[in-house]
Image: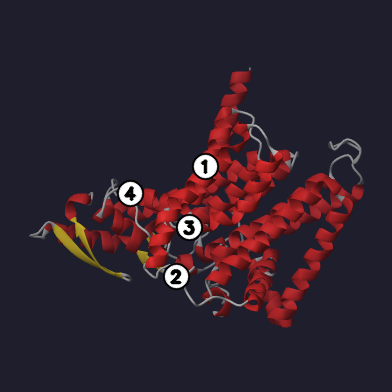
Amino acid sequence: MARSTRVLGIVVQVAAVGIASGLMLLRVPGLPSWRTIYGEDYPVFFTGAIQQPWHLIQYAGYVQVLPQTIAQIVRYLPLADAALAFAVTGAAIAACCALFIFHASAGHIQQVKLRALLAVALVLLPTAPLEIIDSGVDTIWYLLAALFWAMLWRPRTPAATAVAGVIGFVAAASNVLAVLLAPLVAVRLYVLRRPREHVVSVGWLAGCIVQVPFVIQGIHGGRSRLGGHRHATPGQSLAFYGHAVLLPSLGWHLSWWLRSLAGVNGATAIAVAVLVVIFGVILATQRQARPFVVTALTTGFIFAVISVTMYLNPAIVKPLPTYQDGSRYTVLPAFLIVSALIVGAGHALRSPARGHRIHGTSFKPVMAVAALVVFLASTWAVDFRYAGLRSQGVLNWAPIAAKWEHDCANSRTGKIIESTRLGYKTLPCRNITP
């Protein structure tokens, strides 16, 4: 009986990942995401994999191990299927991160339905269609959300511990901004004493060590934002946090409706007032939820402010309903706001005396949780599918693949020269799978 239950659990989780991946693929309008190739997947990672198989390269001042690994694997597939592989892999990794968060949040959210709601919140993130959805290059932003929860998790089995360690390594080795979660590592080292509790910390540290030579190379080559002079001021960084994180946390389309109603500053003030009231109630009434809420909101604030401080453009480029420069920097803080809301809702449904859910839960907490669920569901419905950079700033892959195959078939040197937005690339035809 126990074995059949485990098998059923595995089947349900695999099905959930498949459904979540399919939903994410459907969120991009226009030419389907599985027929387009997006961002650095094409001009940097895929062409780089063809030029130098299984060779890590520095890009934008650091190394992105996971996107480059995806590109290396895609290279072995038929060329015509490259766009499909990037899109499906990106959606599947995001869905797996959501499944991981479902398990890792058990210590903070006892109710299975609320943990499922948290996982869905990552899959249906309102701002995802703007930039990060269905690609290999932007899997690193979903990984950061999983890393945050991995830092707070105390896995009970060796397999779960190993998964947390892998997430720690891959996240840090793929996104240099994972170093901003160092305070969580420090707290974990202080609170937990057994060595097996620190596998995720070791994985995170190993990933950071992998980044070091590439970051140094980027600084010396003038490609790192650490050594640049175009940094945002504190005022600009705080404005970005208010306008691009707090305001859209109520929903992307709702944020633009509020902008039209009260202007950007007025709309932000409304969003801030709503969040202050909600979190004020949570902090005042849910004592056990306070550490998580404070940690989540502080981590998100620090992450957003430091990220945009190092990169000025998101702070000065005017956003549009279909475009928000630097929206990737809002993924973690926005998701942590929702996480804090759901954790607070979970604690509201517990018994004050014993910390467990009881049948006699008062009417007010139940109604508050129901209102949260209705609000999130309506927001996700409105923001499920809309045109963003992911659907507009892409390349139709079929003509590119056909041209590559044609040029290779007629090449006398065994190489072709491809023009990308980052310059010309010489590609050996022997490394292209027709």
- Residue at point 48%, 45% (across, down): 206
Comparing labels 4 and 2, the label whose residue is closer to the camera:
4
- Mark 4 or mark 2: name the one nearer the start of the chain: 4
Q: Position of residue 265 (x, y in %)?
A: 71, 80
C-alpha separation, residue under disc 4 versus residue under disc 3: 16 Å
Q: Amino acid at mark 1?
A: Gly
Q: Secondary structure at mark 2?
A: helix
Between label 4 and label 1, give the one nearer the viewer.
1
- Whether residues under marks 4 and 3 lie with C-beta atoms below 8 angstroms apart, the answer is no
Label whose residue precedes the other's in the sequence (4 or 1) = 4
Disc number placed over residue 203 in the picture, else none? 1
Element type at marker 1? Answer: helix
Q: Position of residue 159 (x, y in %)?
A: 55, 30
Disc number for residue 138: 3
For marks 1 and 3 on the same chain, the one whose residue lies earlier in the sequence: 3
Question: Residue 206 vs residue 185: left or right?
Answer: left
State whether residue 422 is above or below residue 75: below
Amino acid on which disc 3 is placed: Asp
Q: Quadrant of the N terminus?
A: top right
The image shows residue 419, relative to residue 152, as above or below, that is below
Left or right position of 233 against 413: right
Give the residue at x 62% y 61%. 303
Q: Is residue 48 visible?
A: yes
Residue 167 position (above or below residue 219): above
The Cα–Cα distance between marks 4 and 1, rounded to whole angstroms, is: 22 Å
Q: Amino acid at mark 4?
A: Gln
Distance CA(mark 3)–CA(mark 2): 16 Å
